[in-house]
Image: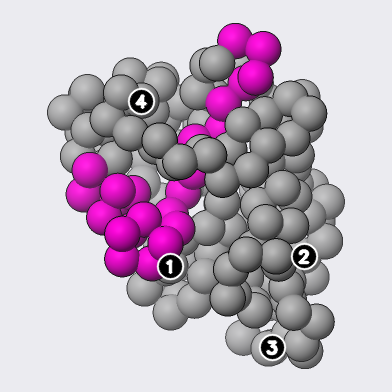
């Protein structure tokens, strides 16, 4: 398993099939309430398919996908962070999902700031987007702590979505 980067408290690494139980645990109904994929991860088979068919495939195809967030102190996978080549928006998206036992401890901000720094140094990405449901106040705070700029809002499937962006190369941000 490839380690991407580390922080004082976290290891950011690629997922592997041995992480299936942890993926199941951090995809609870409460955690996925605003993600658009609530209820899509209910069994170990579901999580193995996500790991194999999405993340492992995207590591090979793009060189990146969502990465595991691992607590250094316990070696426990507590969630994911990082980038996704999102065909829905035809751009690179930054995202995070943590088991709710680990909310409010700064792990989402810490892990994604490390991903942004890693991308600036090692990846050929310019603009990164982050989208969040307007009701998800905790996630909005994280997006803003990452230094992302509000671009616009739109409506999708009954939700108001806020789109943010950040340039990793210092270029102007698009208005869309």
3D distance between C-alphas at marks 1 and 3: 19 Å
Measured Cα–Cα span from mark 1 to mark 4:
21 Å
The residue at which mark 2 appears reads as 148
The reply to whether discs 3 and 2 touch (Cβ–Cβ < 8 Å) is no
Q: Which residues are magenta?
A: 52-74
Distance between the alpha carbons at the discs numbered 3 and 2: 13 Å
How many neighbours does mark 3 have within 10 angstroms: few (below 14), some (14-19), or many (20 or more)? few
Q: In the image, 140: left or right of 21?
A: right
For the C terminus, the image quarter is bottom right
* Residue corresponding to mark 4: 19
- Which residue lies under the disc numbered 3? 175
Coordinates of residue 20 in the picture (x, y in percent): 30, 25
Mark closer to the chain start, 3 or 2: 2
Position in image of residue 125 (x %, y %): 59, 75
Of pointers 1 and 4, the one earlier in the residue sequence: 4
What residue is disc 1 on?
85
Residue drawn at (56%, 32%) of the image: 69
Q: Which quadrant is home to the N terminus?
A: top left
Point 36% across, 73% down: residue: 87
Secondary structure of the residue carrying numbered label 4: helix
Name which of mark 1 and mark 3 comes first in the sequence.
1
Depth check, mark 2 against mark 4: the one in front is: 4
Secondary structure type for disc 1: strand
Report x, y in % for residue 48.
Answer: 22, 33
Ranked by sequence position, the earlier of labels 2 and 1 is 1
- Residues under labels 2 and 1: Cα distance? 18 Å
Compared across the picture, whether 162 is left or right of 173 comes to: left
């Amino acid at each position: 398993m490839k380690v991407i980067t580390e922080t004082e408290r976290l290891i950011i690494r690629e997922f592997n099939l041995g992480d299936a139980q942890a993926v199941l645990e951090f995809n609870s109904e409460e955690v996925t309430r605003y993600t658009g994929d609530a209820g899509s991860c209910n069994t170990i088979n579901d999580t193995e398919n996500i790991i194999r068919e999405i993340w492992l495939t995207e590591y090979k195809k793009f060189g990146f996908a969502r990465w595991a967030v691992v607590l250094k102190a316990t070696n426990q996978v507590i969630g994911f962070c990082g980038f996704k080549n999102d065909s829905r928006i035809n751009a690179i998206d930054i995202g995070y999902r943590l088991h709710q036992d680990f909310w409010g401890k700064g792990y989402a901000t810490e892990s994604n700031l490390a991903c942004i720094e890693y991308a600036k140094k090692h990846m050929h990405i310019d603009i990164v987007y982050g989208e969040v449901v307007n009701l998800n106040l905790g996630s909005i705070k994280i997006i803003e702590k990452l230094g992302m700029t509000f671009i616009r809002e739109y409506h999708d499937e009954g939700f108001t979505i806020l789109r943010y962006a950040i340039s990793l190369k210092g270029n102007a941000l698009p208005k869309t």
